[in-house]
Amino acid sequence: MDDKKLVYMANQIGKAFAYQDEAASVASIAGHIRSFWEPRMKKAILAYEQAGGTGLDSRVLAAVRSLRPAQ
C-alpha cells in the first residue's frame, strides 16, 4: 500500500473522531488502528511516522506515535 493511501486512511479515521477532545481523539484513533489495521499496514504507518509523518493530522500523528513500542 502506498504512503498517500495510508495517510489518507489515517486522516479519515482522525476526522471520524474529531468531535472528541484531543486526548480522547488520539486514544480512539490509536485504538482503531490497533484493532482494525492489518500488521503490514501498522508497520507501514509506523515507518512513515518515523520518516517524518508529513501530511498526517497532528492528532493522527500523536496516535501513531503512541503505537510505537516502548524502547
Image (tube, rainbow, N blue to C red):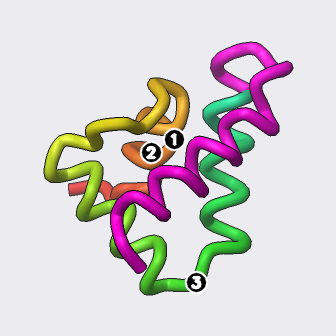
User: Which sits earlier in the primary sequence, circle 2 or circle 3?
Assistant: 3
Residue type, numbered disc 1 = Ala
Kind of element beneath mark 3: loop
Q: Label 2's element?
A: helix
User: Residue 50: x, y in percent?
Assistant: 19, 52
Task: Specify the amino acid type for callout 2.
Answer: Ser
Q: Which residue is mark 3?
A: 38
The extreme right residue here reads: 19
Percent x, y of residue 10: 57, 51
Q: Give the extent of the magenta segment.
A: 1-24
Q: Which residue is mark 1?
A: 63
Image coordinates for residue 71, horizontal then vertical, percent:
20, 56
> Eyeballing the image, is 46 above or below 57?
below
Considering the whole magenta stretch, tell me its main secondary structure. helix
31 is higher (above) or lower (below) than 52: below
Question: Along the polypeptide, which appears first: circle 3 or circle 1?
Answer: 3
